[in-house]
Amino acid sequence: MHGALVTAVSPKAMEQAYGFLRAKGTMSLVGLPPGYISLPVFDTVLKRITVRGSIVGTRQDLEESLQFAGEGKVASHFSWDKIENINEIFHRMEEGRIDGRVVLDLAA
């Protein structure tokens, strides 16, 4: 998995989410538990895993944020394209002409 968003203030949940990450994955912690969490230093360095966290906001803020997303008030910027167009996609990317991300449709 490329990324994990952990909203549970639980060391066990954070450790489990970490276990699902692939190399260069990112784990974002929304809210931090008191005390410590246990993450493998060796794997974190070798796999270049990023761990980020935030303690800004309350559980109510989190609930409202998820409600906004559920109501469709949060949108990601992406477009679909075919693998055959990969060179053109890279060209647009180098020129900074991609808004958000390009998702390759491998089934097309």
Image: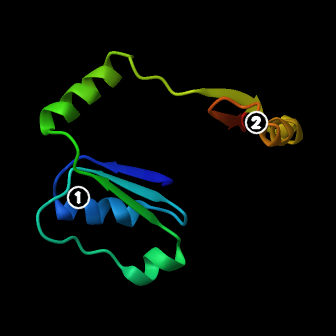
Q: Is residue 17 left or right of residue 104?
A: left
In the rendered image, the residue lying farthest to the front is 56
Residue placed under numbered mark 2 in the picture: 96
Judging depth in this view, the residue of 106 and 92 nearest the camera is 92
Few, some or many residues within 10 Å of mark 2 (<14, 14–19, 20+):
few
Q: Percent x, y for residue 62?
A: 22, 35
Q: Is residue 8 left or right of residue 1?
A: left
Q: Does residue 108 appear in the picture of this structure?
A: no
When the figure is inspected, residue 45 is found, relative to residue 56, above or below; the finding is below
Residue placed under numbered mark 1 in the picture: 13
Residue visible at 39% across and 16% down?
Answer: 72
Q: Residue 77 falls in which quadrant of the image?
A: top right
Few, some or many residues within 10 Å of mark 1 (<14, 14–19, 20+):
some
- Tag 2: residue type? Gly
Q: Residue 107 falls in which quadrant of the image?
A: top right
For residue 29, which numbered disc appears in the image?
A: none
Quadrant position of the C terminus in the picture? top right
Residue visible at 33% across and 59% down?
Answer: 17
